[in-house]
């Protein structure tokens, strides 16, 4: 432990991030697929975003316009893509800051045309088809095709860049070749109706990358929007159990938290039960006296401390509060004491919150 370091410290390996981006983008490129690099999971951390550009991402993308504006201010060239279908109240910023946006509502598209006219600036849109995951997107293909025709023929400042879909989010629906063929069918109908080819047929997010990995992505899907698969690379090999994805590093991030207390205590609270700090009624199992360590990071930093994954064997997250995480270290072979550092792997939620916490120091490492 270096006496100078401050904690909690989130180390981000730029080398591992670039490695993952290169592996994923090159496999996509080999199958004719360009990739929007999605920066929302790490609050558009500029060094990571600019690495994505260098690795050949075709756009930098986020759900939040603020992220796009920050990267623009940092001097990154873009082009920029807004992922969350916009609020009508933010269309001024959409036209000002984003080059592309995903869309699923005709009233919004018409208001977008007005805003483009007001700013005398064109804007490209991708109309979303809902193929069963039940978040955003047109449900009926006919309605989507009609909307595309209206954009093409009547909204002079709004350019129809293409169509897209999103899977594996709300409804946990798996992207399959069949779903991709459904999207291609819609794309071909739109092309027939407008009499030209679409620039983009966007097949989804990290979960759709599985089809590139397995070589089962149908030809014609020419765009994906990938965030988590590059920065965490955890979801697919671990949650999906895809074993031969070992070309990705899962430890781009390391959370280092400092131990503030180590003590043997009962595992069952003593006294009359009321409620915990969050209004919950937790259930405890009596495992006798156990050695525990407190580290100085909590729900205010990571939201869900149970998603923190201690890297060392023999350490288990028991729970915690806004500012503490309580670890069971009874089976940890080493000797922990106050001042020591415990390392954790992250998942999507913990990454998201830690990057936003002003109390967490972020440091790029090789
Ligand atoms: C967040 C998001 C993505 C990227 O998702 P990952 O799982 O991080 O790759 C892609 N498309 C849309 C619409 C999103 O909101």
Image (spheres, rainbow, N blue to C red):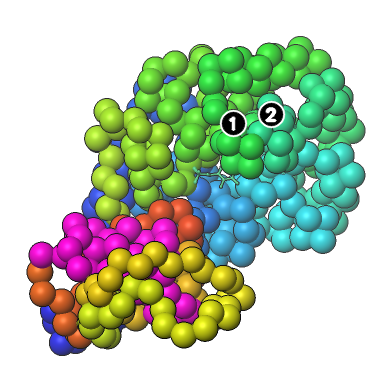
Q: Is residue 66 left or right of residue 284?
A: right
Which residue is label 2 attached to? Answer: 132
What residue sits 82% from the left and 24% below the top? 140
Q: Give the range drawn in magenta.
A: 305-333
Category of crowding for the residue at label 1, using alpha-carbon neighbours closer than 10 angstroms: few (below 14), some (14–19), many (at least 20): some
Return the x and y of residue 131 as percentages of the image width and height.
68, 27
Asked if the stretch drawn in magenta spans residue 320, the answer is yes
Q: In this view, does 321 lie to the left or right of 204?
A: left
What residue sits 27% from the left and 85% below the top? 260
In the rendered view, tell whether residue 19 sits above or below residue 194: below
Can you tell which mark lies on residue 162? none
Secondary structure under tag 1 reads: loop
Secondary structure under tag 2 reads: loop
Q: Is residue 39 left or right of residue 213?
A: right
Quarter of the picture holding the C terminus: bottom left
Return the x and y of residue 155 as percentages of the image width and height.
86, 37
Are the residues flagged by discs 1 and 2 in contact, CB closer than 8 Å? yes
Ligand 1 occupies quarter: top right
């Amino acid at each position: 432990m270096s006496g100078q370091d401050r904690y909690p410290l989130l180390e981000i390996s730029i080398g591992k991030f670039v490695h993952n981006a290169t592996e994923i983008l090159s496999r996509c490129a080999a199958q004719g697929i360009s990739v929007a690099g999605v920066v929302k999971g790490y609050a558009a951390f500029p060094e990571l975003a600019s690495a994505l550009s260098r690795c050949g991402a075709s756009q930098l993308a986020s759900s939040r316009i603020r992220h796009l504006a920050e990267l623009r201010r940092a001097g990154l060239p873009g082009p920029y893509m807004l992922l969350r279908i916009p609020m009508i109240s933010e269309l001024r910023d959409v036209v000002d800051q984003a080059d592309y946006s995903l869309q699923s509502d005709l009233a919004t598209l018409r208001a977008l045309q007005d805003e483009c006219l007001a700013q005398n600036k064109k804007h490209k849109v991708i109309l979303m088809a809902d193929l069963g995951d039940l978040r955003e997107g047109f449900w009926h293909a006919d309605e989507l095709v009609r909307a595309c025709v209206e954009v093409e023929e009547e909204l002079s400042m709004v350019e129809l860049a293409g169509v897209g879909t999103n899977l594996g989010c709300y409804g946990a629906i798996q992207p399959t070749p069949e779903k991709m063929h459904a999207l291609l069918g819609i794309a071909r109908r739109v092309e027939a109706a407008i009499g030209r080819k679409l620039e983009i047929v966007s097949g989804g997010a990290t979960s759709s990358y599985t089809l590139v990995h397995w070589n089962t992505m149908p030809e014609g899907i020419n765009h994906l929007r990938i965030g988590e698969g590059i920065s965490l690379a955890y979801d697919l090999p671990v949650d999906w159990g895809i074993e031969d994805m070992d070309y990705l590093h899962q430890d781009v991030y390391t959370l280092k938290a400092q131990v503030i207390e180590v003590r043997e205590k009962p595992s069952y609270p003593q006294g009359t039960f009321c409620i915990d700090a969050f209004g919950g009624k937790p259930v405890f199992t009596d495992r006798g006296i156990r050695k525990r360590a407190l580290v100085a990071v909590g729900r205010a930093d990571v939201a869900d401390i149970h998603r923190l994954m201690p890297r060392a064997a023999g350490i288990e997250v028991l729970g915690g509060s806004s500012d503490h995480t309580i670890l069971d270290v009874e089976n940890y072979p080493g000797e922990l004491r106050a001042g020591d550092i415990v390392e954790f792997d992250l998942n999507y939620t913990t990454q998201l919150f830690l990057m936003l916490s002003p109390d967490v120091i972020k440091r790029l490492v090789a």
